[in-house]
Image: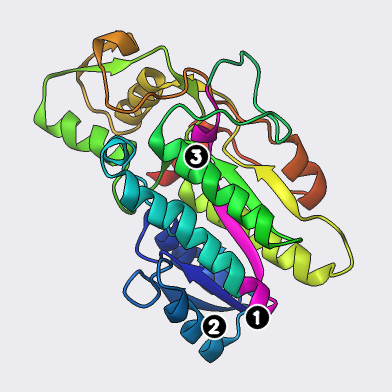
Amino acid sequence: MVVLVTGANGQLGQSLQFIAEKYSQIDFVFCDSKALDITQKTGIESVFNKIKPDFCINTAAYTAVDKAETETEKAEAINATGVKNLAEVCKEFKTQLIHVSTDFVFDGTKKTPYTEEDIPNPKSVYGQTKLDGEKAVQAVLEDYFIIRTSWVYSQFGANFMKTMLRLGAERDSLSVVNDQIGTPTNAVDLAEALVQIVVFVSQHPTHKVSGIYNFSNEGSCSWFDFAQKIFENNTINIDLQPIPTSSYPTPAQRPKYSVLDKTKIKLVFGIAIKGWEESLSNCF
């Protein structure tokens, strides 16, 4: 079984590389943006023609949330047009697409975890381009997997955890927002879930299980709580102060609440999900 992974140099792509050797039954092909630029359809076709993938896990994305407010065309080209290109080529080659999306498709006005049936209403350019990508997949393919996730971190790439560790080493005090609530997601756990979906689908070809799924670690917290746990795990002594979002304005509006309900992915695929605090400890 051949599984193509796009965006191989991103933190999720690197997390998939980290776990790949555990799955000897899968022939993983990892492509970064130089090897496979999803904004160039002919290039995608060329790669697919060579390797004939059974599955494609798309981790390629424009993820600079604040920059997207001014780099709208670039974000749209990767997150929407690029995803449409990939979906069309997957259809052409009868490849099963697993596409990774985000909690930013929601406006954050709910007070209970978002399910897959909740209506998206993004408040940022990034969120809108990711929703446009989801819609492109749904328009092109009958069978697809869209996996929405949140607050992704890992030992790879650039992310909140690594930023906190850097600032913790540089500063004596730090202020972090405490009124945005969500769930940190260890990218390695997300990578494992994506591969478990591949394995399940390949073993149950007649099961109709395609659609949208949520995945994050279990539980919820604020960015302040998340930072506090990062420092605790690394015995970093720092004066950490909670502040409201209004004291830390950013170009892009973040959802105030974006906890994801994981009932569906657990029931359908039997995926066991760790709590965010346990998973954070594992990361270290």
**Residue 99 belongs to magenta span:** yes
Does label 2 or label 1 sit earlier along the sequence? 2
In the image, the segment drawn in magenta is 90-107
Front in this rendered view, residue 161 or 36: 36
At x 69% / y 28%, what residue is drawn? 118
Q: Work out whether residue 188 can be spotted.
A: yes
Q: Number of labelled discs?
A: 3
Q: Quadrant of the C terminus?
A: top left
Residue 48 is marked as 2
Give the residue number, with chain letter if any, for mark 3. Answer: 185
For label 1, the SS is helix
Does label 3 or label 2 sit earlier along the sequence? 2
User: Is disc 2 in contact with disc 1, using a CB cutoff of under 8 Å?
Assistant: yes
Spatial CA distance of label 2 from label 1 is 7 Å
Front in this rendered view, residue 1 or 82: 82
Does label 1 or label 3 sit earlier along the sequence? 1
**For residue 126, what is the image quadrant?**
top left
Residue 72: image location, x then y, percent: 33, 44
| Residue type (three-letter) at the residue carrying disc 3 | Thr
**Residue 5 belongs to magenta span:** no
Residue 110 vertical position relative to residue 60 in the rendered view, above or below: above
Q: Answer with left or right where residue 1 lies relative to residue 175.
A: right
| Residue type (three-letter) at the residue carrying disc 1 | Phe
Give the residue number, with chain letter if any, for mark 1. Answer: 93
* Label 2, residues with CA under 10 Å away: few <14, some 14-19, many ≥20: many
For label 3, the SS is strand
At x 58% / y 43%, what residue is drawn? 148
For label 2, the SS is helix
Q: Which of label 3 and label 2 is nearer to you?
A: 2
